[in-house]
Each structure stands twice: as C-alpha cells, then as structure tokens.
Image (cartoon, rainbow, N blue to C red):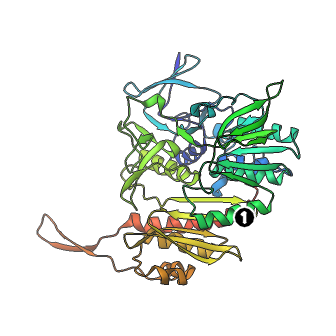
Amino acid sequence: MGRAFVYVILGGGVAAGYAALEFTRKGVSPGELCIISEEPVAPYERPALSKGFLLPESPARLPSFHTCVGANEERLTPKWYKEHGIELVLGTRVKSVDVRRKKLLTATGETISYKILLIATGARALKLEEFGVDGSEAENVCYLRDLADANGLVNVMQSCSSGNAVVIGGGYIGMECAASLAINKINVTLVFPEVHCMARLFTPKIASYYEEYYQSKGVKFVKGTVLTSFEFDSSGKVMAVNLRDGSQLPADLVVVGIGIRPNTSLFEGQLTLEKGGIKVNGKMQTSNDSVYAVGDVAAFPVKLFGETRRLEHVDSARKSAKHAVAAIMEPKKSGEFDYLPFFYSRVFGLSWQFYGDNVGEAVHFGDYSSGTFGAYWISKGHLVGSFLEGGTKEEYEAIAKATSLKPPVEDLAELGQQGLNFALTISKKPQPALPIEVIRSTSGLVLEKPVYAWHAAAGLVLTASIAGFAYWYGRRRRRW
C-alpha cells in the first residue's frame, strides 16, 4: 500500500512551512505536494519555543506561531494546507529512503514515492549520554528542540516556581532559556566549559556585557567546567548537579543545550555529506539531481566567503527553503543561492544582530554603557563580519549592506573611532559602474551590454530586507 506525489518535503520544521508557501506561489497543483513530519502539528516557528512560549504571562501558543508569521507572511494553519491541496502526513516517522528508486518507507509500513524530494529534516539535540552522562530520562531534565520538549519544560517550570534551575550550555539555547527562566522568577545558574558565553560568536568583551546584564537579573555563571553526574531523589528526580570542578549545585530543573547534530542518517551512503550535513550546490541540489536539502541539514556554498558551510539558524532555514523551491519550480529563472549569514537573538530587553563571519581581527565600537555597541571583523584587509546591539532599523540595514560589500579596511584604529558611521557611510556610497561585456554575435556584429551581477544586487536588497524585518520583528514581537 502506498501513495505517490510529485513533490515530497521530508521534515516538518520551519523550512518545511516556508517551502510549502513558496510551492503554492510557484503554482504547485493540489495533490502534488506532501509534507511528512514526525511531529503531530503543522510546521511552526521554532524560535518561539525559547522565547514567547516560556513567558509567565500571555505565553505564545499555537496556532499563533505557525509558519510563516516569523517573516511577516501568511500563517499556515492545517486549514491552509487543506485548502491548497497539500497533504500533511503528521506524527509519522520515515525509517528508510531509497533515493535511487525515489521511495520512502514509513514506520507503519506505508510506501510514499516522489519525483522530487526536499530534505528538511533539521537536526536533533545532542543528549548527555553521548558525553558519558546518564540521567536524560529524569522528568525534570529538559531539552528544547520541538513543541513536545517545550511543553515538558513549561510543566516542570510551573512545578518549581522560585526553585533552582541549572542550564547546561552557554550557547543560543542556554542563553535564551536562562533569560526565560529568570523572567519566571526561577533561580538560574548557567554552566559551560568555555571561558565566556556564546563562545562561537561573541568576543570576550561582548560576552562580558551580556554576562553582567544577566547577573543583574539574578543569573549566575559557572564557567570552565562541565556536568559529570546527577544526584537523584527516591522518585528518580534530579536534586543536584555534580560538576567536574568538584562543586555541586542544587537543581529542581535542568535544561540541557549542548548543541545539535544534523539528521542525515537516512541518506548516509546515498548522498554526499560534508561539514556534518548533506552537501548541496547553489541550487540547494544534492548529489542526486532529484533530491534537494535545506535548513540545518544542508551544507551549501556561501558565495560571500567562497566556501561550503552549514548554518544553524532560522533565517538560513527560511531563505534556503524558498530558494530551493524556486530552483525546483523555475530552474531557468533561479540563480545561485547568494546568502549573507545572519544571526540574531533577543533576551530580556536586549536585541542584537550579526552578519557575515567572525574571523580575523575584531574591532569594537560604541558606548557599552548606553547599550548601543558593536564590532567589526576584519580579515585579509576587508570587512567580513559585523555585530550590533541596540541599533535602529537604519543601522542594522547599514551593517548588513556594508558586510555584503566586503569593503577594504586599512586602519583598524580609525575604524574603531568611526564605529557605526563607517557602515552608514559605506552603505550610502554609490556602487561602481558595472563593467561592459563585449559579445560577438554569430552574424559578426559586436554588441556591448552591461554585465549585470543581478544576484549581487538581489543580495543587497535581501540583506536590507532581512535587517529591516529583524528590527521590526524584535520591536513588534518581543515575546517571540
């Protein structure tokens, strides 16, 4: 017994929702598209889980954050999918995929065939057991990757009001969950092995600002050590956390955010893998021309830096999904994916944005006491990355555009003195005239035409729109 579709999206996260919307805009016919998801609900905006979902008052709940509200688009409820003839196969695990035969086999034994497969399987949270620590099954040890995780975390939070929470991990999930727990008046201690929080992105100076802000909200930091074991009570609940430095922390709740691993197992030995994910080209097409991959699971060429990368952020999931569908539905019209890496976060009353790459030498600027500050990263004499906290819409757009242009920088001291003015000035400069390409036609006529790097121009428009939306999103939807 089986079903057949022209297009199948495997995975029901953020990328799946944005891909579905783009399919409808590109003219997919009713009955042609299917989404298969292990989750029992239609695709939703995952960032809400570590923000608005955890708020003590008026928390975000479905259907309010179904995709694609995160990009100020339509909200795709189950009714929307039905009206557009899109089959939602929810609560279903796929146990094998045969890309040569273009078939998927579900855990219930059903076969689903396709002509084009879009992989949006995302990633799973790394478990403590993978690092030699037992205890993940305790009811007050929580991870945060999907809606079920979020519901479980809320239940434990409500049962330990004014209690003690230990958050393991100082990255995105750790920082955002720590803020939400503190807002819920829970005593929070953040534990991580690095010398400062957000070590993969923040400089020590930037990190110190956020750590001090968190501490002003009652959050404690234990750095340079890791969890080694738990202490359990007679009912099996965790009551304390043991650390490698010999200390012990009381715990009514433990939140674990120690990284993710892309869900590639179904395709190992069938598709080319790279950087821990599925390797794709600029069309988001894998080594099999009938299979595409997007979001956290995809390792794609970042044109700005001339190398393949795998990015773990919602913006990349949204944009790569839309680009893949355009490449599938309109292959002759779509160009290469020209993406400027973009990351953002909002905690307490703070909001920052980062564009590009944090390699090379960091140059800090701004007034930390006022809450508006940032940094540029300079590599091989060019601007390659920009960070800004507390900016305006115009300022975020400026650092995005400046980073995409990779302007030369000769004097780092002067750059630090110029601060935001550097990006504002660069972003307003008229761009050099485009070169002229001389083309000799078959008739012998010599034609001249501008070489329009349309993808670069589109990239600049996109960066400005991303920055503008992120600013609006931060101001209007703080609770997400």
Q: Nearer the viewer, residue 128 or 275?
A: 128
Give the residue at the far front of this rendering: 246
Q: Secondary structure at mark 1?
A: helix
Question: Can residue 123 be seen?
Answer: yes
* Position of residue 232 measured from the top left corner of the image (x, y, whole percent): 78, 29
Residue drawn at the location 60% of the way across and 32% of the way down: 37
Q: Is residue 45 in sight in this rendering? A: no
* Residue 129 vs residue 32, the one in the foreground: 129
Residue assigned mark 1? 212
Q: Is residue 38 above or below residue 285?
A: above
Between 458 and 29, the one lying in front of the other is 458
Q: Position of residue 352 (x, y in %)?
A: 64, 65
Q: Residue at x 82, y 37 (%)?
A: 155
**Placement of 109 over or under 347, stated as above or below:** above
Q: Residue at x 39, y 76 (%)?
A: 408
**Residue 108 % position (x, y):** 59, 17
Q: Is residue 199 above or below residue 61?
A: below
